[in-house]
Amino acid sequence: MSNQVPIHEGLFTWPSAKPQLLGSRCVNCAETAFPAQPDCRNCGSRETTIVELGDQGILWSWTIQTFMPKAPYKSDETAETFQPYGVGYVEMPGGVRVESRLLPNKPEDLQIGMPMKLDIIPFRTDGTDGSGDQIMTFRFSPVKEA
């Protein structure tokens, strides 16, 4: 049986009942970055700390990816099974904007300013025969109204 593993350590808290994106915050100027960076891109300080960015944000901009990404992109999809997907920037509390896949893949289902929530999803399976670890990534999808 394969294990589920994150696509990259340190992108999100997982497994967790309520996963959160992880970023870095500069100790000197409070600049926040995603993904986490060892150095501050604002003031150049080498003093940053890991912070939880949250699990909800606002859709800032988006588009629909209608073609299969080129190498070195790795997924379980082939040119024959590829399905267009939404991709955009989600603004998290505190102002950092995160580039992410989006669940809707139709323009009529996406609107700038809509509330979005973090999902942890399977991305691909390692191994040539598909028997390796299941690689998990994140995406955002619309917050359902209660």
Image: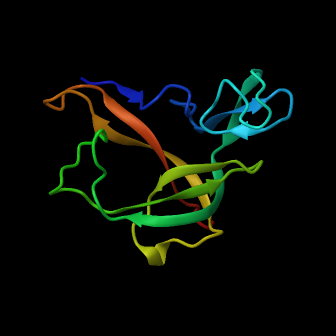
Location of residue 107 with respect to 33 vertically, above or below: below
Q: Is residue 72 or residue 22 the one in the foreground?
A: 72
Indicate the quadrant containing the C terminus: top left, top right, bottom left or bottom right.
bottom right
* Residue 56 image offset from top left, x and y in percent: 64, 51
Please give left or right for residue 79 compared with residue 138 in the image.
left
x, y (%) of residue 67?
29, 61
The residue nearer to you, when weighing 127 against 143, is 127
| Residue 90, picture quadrant | bottom right
Please, is residue 50 above or below residue 78 in the view? above
Number of numbered discs = 0
For the point 40% across and 27% down, the residue is: 5
Residue that lies at the very extreme toward the front in this rendered image: 44
* Residue 97 drawn above or below residue 112: above
The residue at the point 63 percent across, 31 percent down is 36
Judge from the rendering whether residue 17 lies leftward or rightward of residue 92; answer left or right: left
Q: Is residue 26 left or right of residue 146?
A: right
Work out which quarter of the rendered image holds the N terminus and state it.
Answer: top left
Q: Residue 145, position in %: x, y? A: 61, 67
Model colouring: rainbow
For image coordinates 51% across by 71% down, the residue present is 110
- Residue lying farthest to the right in this orientation: 28
Residue at 75% over, 25% down: 48
Within the image, what quadrant is residue 81 found in?
bottom left
In the displayed image of the protein, which residue is found farthest to the bottom?
108
Q: Above or below — where is 45 with respect to 17?
A: above
